[in-house]
Every structure is written in C-alpha cells, then in structure tokens.
Image (cartoon, grey):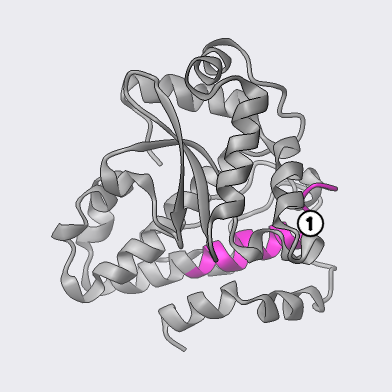
C-alpha cells in the first residue's frame, strides 16, 4: 500500500473501529516511547510523549492517544523517511523552512511532503501543547487573548466554532505574529500556516481519528472537552518564543 493510500486508510472511521477491537494490553501507564513506526534509521522520528497515554482521560482516552501517536503520526514519519531516501534535502533544512518554501521541493514529491511534513509538524505541536494539570492562561498569553480574541470565553467559543465548521478533516489553529498578535484560522487536511509564513501558537486536530472512539460523530463535544487537556505553561513558552522569533513547529 502506498504512503498516500495508507494515510487515507488511517483517517477512515472504519479503521478506527478496527483498531478499537485490538487488545488493550499495550496501553502505556508511563510516558510513551517513540513507536516502531517512528522511522528509526531515517532522519524523521515521532517525538515521544512526555506523559502517559492515559494521562488525558476522561477527555481523550488512552487507546485513541496510542493509535493517534504511534500509528497516525508514525505513518506520516514513515512516508517522510521514504521520500528522504532519494531526496535527502527535505531533512537537511528545518521543517519550517521546507514547509515555508514548498516550491523548492521536487514536484514529484511536493504534495506528499506537504501532506506528510504538515502532519508531522501539526502533531509535534499537538503533543507538546497538551498534558495533565495544564493550569490556566495567565500573564502575556492571557493579555493577548483578551486584546486580540475578545477574552477567554469568546476565544474558546470562536475556536470551537471554527473547528466545528471545518468540513471533513483538518485543524483549527491560533496563529501568532512576531509582534504577538493572535488570530484563529482553520485549515484542511494537514495544511499548516507555516506554508504562508505564519507560526502556530496552538491548535486542535479535528480529524476523526483524534476523537472517534469516544465521541463518534460528536465533534462539538470533543472540541469542548479538549480544553481540559491544554497545557498553558507550554503555550506560554511558545508565545514567548514566537515573540523572540525562535518558535519552530
């Protein structure tokens, strides 16, 4: 099966149901190691989680986290490592530089790099900004939310609405400019605002594989529950890095 066929296969609800039927004895009760599908031996790898698969329950269940991290993110990385065998230049530069200049990527692999490197960047950010006991927004991040997004209540409502409106698969992001200004935008598939020269402060995955085991078609319930998993300490650090011009993916 090709990397692209595998990507679409993994995103299907039917495959999620099949994964749910697999034995649960592999669930981690400690921080997860990088999976076998992380592309070991290649230049790209799935970053290990800093928390256990079950750490975000009941909001995101352990099985979803395991499948999402190891298999879905692992599939993007495996595809990238396959591309890199004949096109090592895609791994020689920072991810932000490659995504920010896709026109320099050979046409034969450009769509594949856009999809899979975008997926790698999106998920790397996603694992980082979640965690147990994530605190609350405060300091400069809270001030920016109040200034640019109308305060926490309005921000969360608008963010959830953007995620709910995203047709099919995609992401809802908060982008951050060098001056610290925030904006909400949704993107289809694994597209990332980096391709337009922007940086992502935070984002939520609204592909069905991110929530289907627990929430089925109730994306609105998932979007609402997801806020309980947000690690505001990490987001504050990303905000500071964005203002300093050092924020990566």
Residue plotted at (55% across, 28% down): 235
Q: Which residue is mark 1?
A: 62
Q: Main secondary structure of the magenta part?
A: helix
Q: Is residue 66 left or right of residue 127?
A: right
Looking at the image, is 118 positioned above or below residue 11?
Answer: above
Residue 109 image position (x, y, % from top left): 25, 72
Residue 192 seen in this snapshot: yes
Give the structural element (helix, strand or loop) at label 1.
helix
Residue 48 included in the magenta stretch of the image: no
In the rendered image, the vertical position of residue 202 relative to residue 11, given as above or below = above
Q: Quadrant of the C terminus?
A: top left
Can you tell which quarter of the image residue 65 is in?
bottom right
Q: Position of residue 239 (x, y in %)?
A: 46, 23
Asked whether the viewer can see residue 205, the reply is no
Residue 80 placement (x, y as % from top left): 37, 67
Residue 18's x, y, as percent?
74, 81
Q: Residue at x 80, y 47 (%)?
A: 59
Front position in the image: 223 or 127: 223
Residue beneath the point at 59% across and 29% down:
155
Is 65 part of what is drawn in magenta? yes
In the displayed structure image, the side of residue 104 where residue 83 appears, left or right: right
List the single residue furthest toward the bottom: 1
Q: Please name the residue shown 29% across and 49% down the image.
A: 195
Relative vertical location of residue 129 with respect to residue 75 in this rendering, above or below:
above
Q: In this view of the protein, which residue sits in the foreground, 143 or 213?
A: 143
Instruction: Count residues near mark 1 (Cα–Cα under 10 Å), then give few for <14, some for 14-19, many for 20+.
Output: many
Please provide the residue range marked out in magenta: 58-75
Q: State the count of labels.
A: 1
């Amino acid at each position: 099966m090709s990397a692209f066929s595998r990507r679409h296969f993994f995103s299907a609800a039917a495959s999620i149901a099949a994964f749910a039927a697999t034995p649960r004895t592999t669930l981690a009760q400690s921080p997860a190691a990088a999976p076998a599908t992380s592309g070991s031996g290649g230049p790209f790898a799935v970053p290990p989680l800093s928390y256990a698969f079950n750490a975000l329950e009941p909001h995101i269940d352990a099985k979803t986290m395991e499948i999402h991290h190891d298999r879905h993110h692992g599939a993007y990385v495996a595809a990238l490592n396959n591309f890199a065998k004949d096109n090592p230049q895609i791994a020689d530069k920072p991810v932000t530089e490659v995504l920010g200049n896709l026109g320099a990527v050979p046409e034969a692999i450009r769509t594949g790099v856009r999809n899979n490197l975008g997926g790698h960047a999106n998920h790397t950010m996603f694992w980082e900004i979640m965690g147990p006991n994530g605190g609350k927004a405060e300091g400069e991040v809270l001030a920016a939310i109040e200034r640019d997004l109308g305060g926490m209540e309005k921000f969360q409502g608008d963010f959830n609405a953007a995620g709910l409106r995203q047709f099919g698969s995609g992401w809802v992001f908060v982008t951050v400019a060098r001056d610290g200004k925030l904006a909400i935008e949704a993107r289809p598939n694994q597209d990332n605002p980096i391709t337009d020269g922007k940086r992502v402060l935070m984002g939520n995955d609204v592909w069905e594989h991110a929530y289907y085991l627990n929430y089925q078609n109730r994306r609105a319930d998932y979007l609402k529950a997801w806020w309980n998993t947000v690690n505001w300490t990490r987001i504050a650090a990303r905000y500071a890095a964005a203002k300093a011009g050092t924020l990566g993916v």
